[in-house]
Structures are given as C-alpha cells and as structure tokens.
Image (spheres, rainbow, N blue to C red):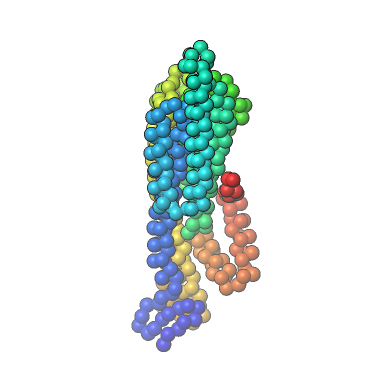
Amino acid sequence: HTDTAGGLDSAPGSPRTFPAQRRLSLSRETARTAAARGQWKRALLHNIQRERGTSLAWIACSGSMTFFFDRLQRNRESTDAALAQVGDEALRRLIAIRREVVDEEVASARRQMLEYALLTDGDASAGAPPVRAIPATFHETLEEYNAIVELILADLEESLLHDLSAEVSPLSHTLIVFTRLKDAFAMLRGFLTGMLAFSEAVLADIPARCVADLVFIMHKQWEYVAALQSKTPTALFVTLSAALQLQSDELADVHSRLVTDFDILGIRRILSVDRCWNLYTAQVDRLQQVEMQLEKQVRAETARLEEQRQESTIALVDAALAVTANDSEHAMSIAQRLASIPPATLKSELLALLTALSPASESVAHATHDHEHEHEGYEAPPPRPAAPP
C-alpha cells in the first residue's frame, strides 16, 4: 500500500521518503544560486564604490584631470557589467540619474573656466575661475552615491539574515560589519582624493558640511573596528587585524594627520591626487579579497545549516509517524538520527512544522525566536533605507 498521511510516501520493501527529501536537493540548488547572486552583488558594490570615488575626483578637478575621466569610464563599464548580472532595473535607473548630474555639473564647470579664460585673455594674475557650484555638487554626489551603496549593503545583509538559515552566526555578523568597514575605507578614498583634486581657490569655499562628512567617515571606521573586536571570534579577528593594517608608511602618515586634526592642507603638500587614489585603492582591494573569503565561508556555513535543518525536518516527521504507527522497528534508528542533530535546530524546525499546521502557532514561533536572540546578544540589522530621489 501507499501511505500518504502527512506527505509520507512508503511502500512494502521500499525506503521511507518525504517531500522534505526532495526539498533538500532543491535547497542545495537554491544555495548555489544565492551564492552566485551574492558574489555578483558584492562585485557590484565594489565597482560602485570605485565609481563613487572617481566621480568625486572628476567633479573636484572640474574635468581637468583626464586620467580620472579614463578611470571613471572604466569604472562605469564594470558597474554596468555587474548590474547586468544582478538584474536590478531600479538600481540601474538611480545610477544613471546620478551619472547625468555628474556629467552635467563637470561640463558646466568646464564651460565656466573656458569663459573665464576668454574674459581674462589667459592672464594668470587674474586667479582661478570662480566655480562656486562645485563644492555643493561634490557633497551632493557623495550623499547620493552613499544612498545607492546603502541599498546594496542592506540587500546583502537581508540575504545573510533571512536566506536559508534563520540563525545569525558570529561569522555572518563579522561579514556584515567587515563589509561596512570596507565601505568606510572606500568612502574615505573618494572623499580625500576629491579634497586633493580641488583647486586652492575652490577648496577655500568648501562648506562646513564637507568637513562634517570627513568626521562622519572616520567615526564610522572606528565604530566598525570596535564592533569587530567585540563580536568576532578571537582567531578570526587576529586574521582580520592583519588585513586592516595600513599597507604603507605613507598611508599611515595620512591617516595619522586625519585622526589628529583633519589636516587636509597638510596632506595636500605631501600627497598627489593620483598617489592618494592608488594608495587607498590598494588598501580597499585588499579588504575586498578578505570580504570575498568571508562571504565564501558564510555561504558554506549557511548551506551546511540548511541541510541540517532539512534533515531534522525529515527525522521529526519520521518520528511522528513512527509514534503514530507504534513502529518499534524504526524507532531506534530515528532516535539516533535525532540525537545527532543540535537541539536548537530541532526546536526551530519543530516550531516551523507546527506553524505550517496552525497559523495561531506563528506568534509562538516568533516569540521563541526573539527570546533566543536576546540570549545570543543578537542585534537586528538597521532598517532598509528608502530609495534616494
């Protein structure tokens, strides 16, 4: 006979099967798909961080440094390639809008400089052309690209916290914080390169909010390092600390000046625009490599936890059916399977099964889940930001 109660399919002389077994192979495929999508999302994040930095430098120099135009074009092409893989049309439109603003503002600044040169007949004593809109555009561009980056970060964090496994492991937490720390470094790269690319005349008109941007970026770096120190397993933090070390004495000196008194003018005297970009890019690329290694470890852990969950579901259903049928023949083997599964996983899956049977039990599952996280020191992720205008 075939017993289909509870979704079980069994026949004389055949092994017991359950739909969860079919879901197990499906979940493995889902994990592979999620891993591929996560990698492309992180590639998109890395490229949009580069595009943010080169856009800021291109604005700050008012289009006078052609090597940044070449970099900007390459960064945009890389961003577009990653966007095509991710397939996020809304994000593509937001990026396109920001690019239009950047290009229009730089073109406007170049027209102003050309007109000024014609009016002064190239007289050097007349001073630099008064391009007043550039500092404000610089700040606005930083904010808008930051909002786009935040959308990608929030999406990555949501996939880590809700994809496949309900558990928030120390490794997942480390990846979330490390990714944000890397973004703070990338943000500083763009900001500081832009500060160095400004002309002396324009730099004098930098509004106070730009200085506040620098303070904010430095504060974020310290905040994320402190979070890594407090939540990351010791052995892993030792490895991460090596990656976080500044890779050159020159960069260490720049960082020291920023931490001590935000000495932008002093940094301008010792560091060229191109050198600043290259030093910070080497540091950010190193962090990117560590980020991808962490992401790979998290995906492996997530896949293992999901397989464990699926196996616990099969064992729990088999146990319920064995008890119902008074099946002593299979009782011991089922008990051994259950004993090999962590109690927390069994509890979580049992609540999930009950929730599926009765909507009223959903509140119980949520209450238990929240209670468990309180004891784990779980911190909820920040709310997903609204899309920038």
Q: Which of 163 and 1 is in front in this view?
A: 163
Query: Residue 302 location, x and y as percent?
Result: 44, 55
Residue 196 drawn above or below residue 238 = above
- Residue for point 42% across, 27% down: 65
Q: In which quarter of the image is residue 270?
A: top left
Return the x and y of residue 100 as percentages of the image width and height: 50, 41
Residue 272 makes an appearance in the image: yes
Q: Which residue is drawn at 42% across and 44% down?
A: 79
Residue 182's x, y, as percent?
A: 47, 38
The residue lying at 52 percent from left, 38 percent from top is 101
Which residue is at the far bottom?
1
Instruction: Identify which residue, 217 or 17, lies in the foreground.
Output: 217
Left or right of residue 155: residue 371: right
Q: Which of 260 and 75 is in front in this view?
A: 75
Say which quadrant the N terminus sits in: bottom left
Image: 141 above or below 361: above
Where's the C terminus, which quadrant? top right
Q: Which is more toward the observer, 318 or 60?
A: 60
The residue lying furthest to the top in this view is 125
The x and y percentages for residue 331 are 45, 75
Left or right position of 206 against 2:
right
